Image (cartoon, rainbow, N blue to C red):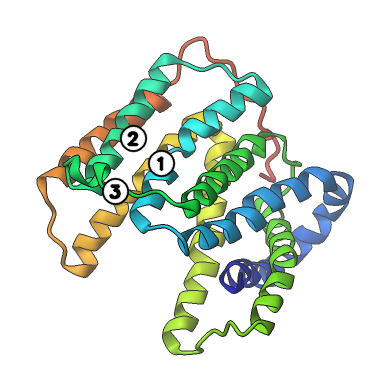
Amino acid sequence: MMIATIRWLPPALILWSLARPKIQNDWPTVRERWGIMLWLGTTGGILFSALQYIGLKYTTALNASILNSLVPVLIIALGALIFRDPIRSLQLLGIASSFVGVLTILTGGGTAVLWNLQFNPGDLIVVFTMTVFAMYAAYLRVRPVMHWLSFLFFIAVISTAGTLPFAVFEFASGERVNLTWWTVAAALYVGIAPSLLAFAAWNRGVELIGPNRAGPFLHFVPLYTALLGTALLGERLMGFHVLGLLLILVGVWLAVKPSSSRARHSFPHGDTKT
């Protein structure tokens, strides 16, 4: 819970210092639409951030990576159930192809790893976490129209307020963070890269192309992990990495390919503030 709090506290402080006039200007909008803002902050910030770290305490990174790849399917399913989004067969084919590409990278191109997987209660937490994030992605279409810096600031504030009490309880129970240069650097990275920069890019991408077409791009995460491991950790780039890359690229291309009859989504992108 301390990590979840640290993930959102630096963005809140940074955004307040950088965009205070915009935040103050958009405060009436937030006050008017506080319900949807609280819902987005709870799903995209509090629950998603906290539960993924809790789930990883009880399951393996491999299990979590495979289960994370269910998010594109969950986004499409929730969009269809809640907002009656149409489901295209080409989209499902693309998600299937990119999912196979993810499995190819994670398992080294073999099936033995999959047969030997052992599931545990932590996997249920991870699946629920991914469902929560898919809910956040689906509901982004009804977020209030405001400057993107203001939106991120209020999400960060809600997330910090929601996780901080549990972090305090965790600290009082004896859980401690060893303050070293490495932990400080890790905390700053978690607060700036995934929470501030990545969330801003994700929100804008979903706003432009919709959640169903944005979801398959999440399958690039294990690919980037493999490429970064090759570049930074000296790991070898193998044939199954290349095969996985091709399957992911083809899958994402199929999934995001617009159909001629596709209606424009209802995201509030017409306002220049977004």
x and y percentages locating residue 249 in the rendered image:
28, 35
Q: Can residue 209 be seen in this view?
A: no
According to the picture, the residue beneath numbered tag 1 turns out to be 69
- Please indicate whether residue 242 sits to the left or right of residue 192 in the image: left
* Residue 161, picture quadrant: bottom right
CA neighbours of label 3 inside 10 A, class few (<14), some (14 to 19), many (20+): many
Instruction: State if disc 3 and disc 2 touch (CB < 8 Å).
Output: no
Instruction: State if disc 1 and disc 3 touch (CB < 8 Å).
Output: no
- Work out how far the residue at label 2 is from the one at label 3, CA to CA, in angstroms: 11 Å
Instruction: State if disc 2 and disc 1 touch (CB < 8 Å).
Output: yes
CA neighbours of label 2 inside 10 A, class few (<14), some (14 to 19), many (20+): many
According to the picture, the residue beneath numbered tag 2 turns out to be 99
x and y percentages locating residue 265 in the rendered image:
62, 24
- The answer to which of marks 2 and 3 sits earlier in the sequence is 2
Q: In this view, does 269 lie above or below 274?
A: above
SS under mark 2: helix
According to the picture, the residue beneath numbered tag 3 turns out to be 223
Q: What residue type is labelled 2?
A: Phe
In front: mark 3 or mark 1? 1
